[in-house]
Image: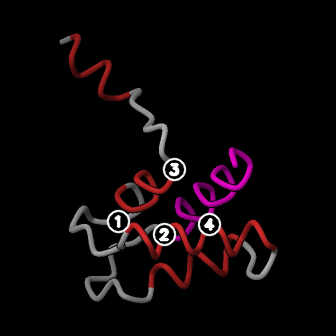
Amino acid sequence: MVLAETDAHFEPKNPVTHLMTDPTCGQGLISHNFARKMIDWVKVGEPTPRQAARYLARPRVCGAFNIDRAQSLLAKAVEMA
């Protein structure tokens, strides 16, 4: 199916949106402002991308959060900005 092929390669242009949904279980518990703040902090050099990813994982009570994926998304978001 053509739709499935295009969906598989979909990369949102907004790294904040990608960070809010991709490393999680899809419940949407990471707010836009929280994700933006983590990206901005990593840009300044305050925490490393790994530390910011762990900080993003804290409110996830279900435990479904991929810290490695969030770390790579944070690093890419900083490079894009």
Q: Is 54 displayed left or right of 65 in the figure?
A: right
Give the colour scheme shown: secondary structure
Q: Amino acid at mark 1?
A: Thr
Residue drawn at x 69%, y 44% is: 80
Q: Amino acid at mark 4?
A: Ile
Residue designated by label 2: 35
Residue designated by label 4: 39
Please tell me whether mark 4 sits on a helix, a strand or a loop. Answer: helix
Please tell me whether mark 1 sits on a helix, a strand or a loop. Answer: loop
Instruction: Give the image location of residue 24, x and y in percent.
Output: 35, 65
Mark pair 3, 4: CA separation = 9 Å
> Magenta part of the protein: which range?
67-81
The crowd level at tag 2 (other Cα within 10 Å; few <14, some 14-19, many 20+) is many
Instruction: Give the image location of residue 66, x and y in percent.
Output: 46, 67
Mark pair 2, 1: CA separation = 12 Å
Q: Where residue 24 is drawn, which disc sits there?
A: 1
Q: Mark 4 and 2 residues: CB-CB less than 8 Å, in contact?
A: yes
Residue drawn at x 53%, y 59% is: 69
Residue designated by label 3: 15
Residue 48 lies in the magenta stretch: no
